[in-house]
Amino acid sequence: MINDMEKNISGDKHFGYIFCKIGMFLIGIYYMTCLQFQIPFINLSFTVLFYFEHLLDYSSIITKMASQISRILVLTPYIFT
């Protein structure tokens, strides 16, 4: 029974890790769109990150770091234009 619980936990962690990677990839897409068209898609990326943040505890650390990075990346084109 303990082994089954450990397998479930490790499976959930792997699932959460994949979702976090997808979230990081989406941030990159939003950043490129902002650079190309100068349209602020930052609200969409934060909505995605907020959803991923509630999947697992360790994923919230990754998404918070990603959201801080995305703030910097998306705001820089507007500062220098």
Image (cartoon, rainbow, N blue to C red):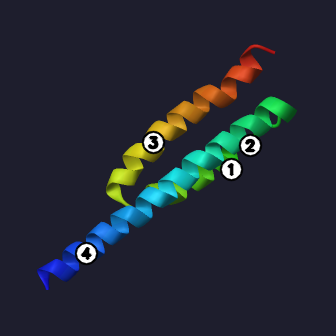
- Tell me which label, 3 or 2, sits earlier in the chain: 2
Cβ–Cβ below 8 Å for labels 2 and 4? no
Q: Distance from label 2 to label 4 (Cα)?
A: 38 Å
- Tell me which label, 2 or 4, sits earlier in the chain: 4
Horizontal relation, residue 17 to residue 58: left or right: right
Q: Looking at the picture, how far across and down is residue 75, in whole percent?
A: 68, 26
Horizontal relation, residue 30 to residue 68: left or right: right
| Residue at which label 3 appears | 64
Q: Looking at the picture, how far across and down is residue 63, in whole percent?
A: 47, 46
Q: Looking at the picture, how far across and down is residue 44, in whole percent?
A: 68, 50
| Residue at which label 4 appears | 7
Q: Secondary structure at mark 3?
A: helix
Regarding residue 49, the answer to whether it shows in the image is no
- Tell me which label, 3 or 4, sits earlier in the chain: 4
- Taking the view exactly as shown, the residue that stands out farthest to the left is 2
Q: Amino acid at mark 3?
A: Lys
Number of other residues with Cα within 10 Å of mark 3, as a class: few under 14, some 14 to 19, many 20 or more: some
Q: Amino acid at mark 2?
A: Phe
Question: Residue at coordinates 42% horizontally, 44% vertically from top-left?
Answer: 62
Number of other residues with Cα within 10 Å of mark 2, as a class: few under 14, some 14 to 19, many 20 or more: some
Q: Distance from label 1 to label 3 (Cα)?
A: 15 Å
Which label belongs to residue 41? 2
- Tell me which label, 1 or 3, sits earlier in the chain: 1
| Residue at which label 1 appears | 44
Horizontal relation, residue 9 to residue 51: left or right: left
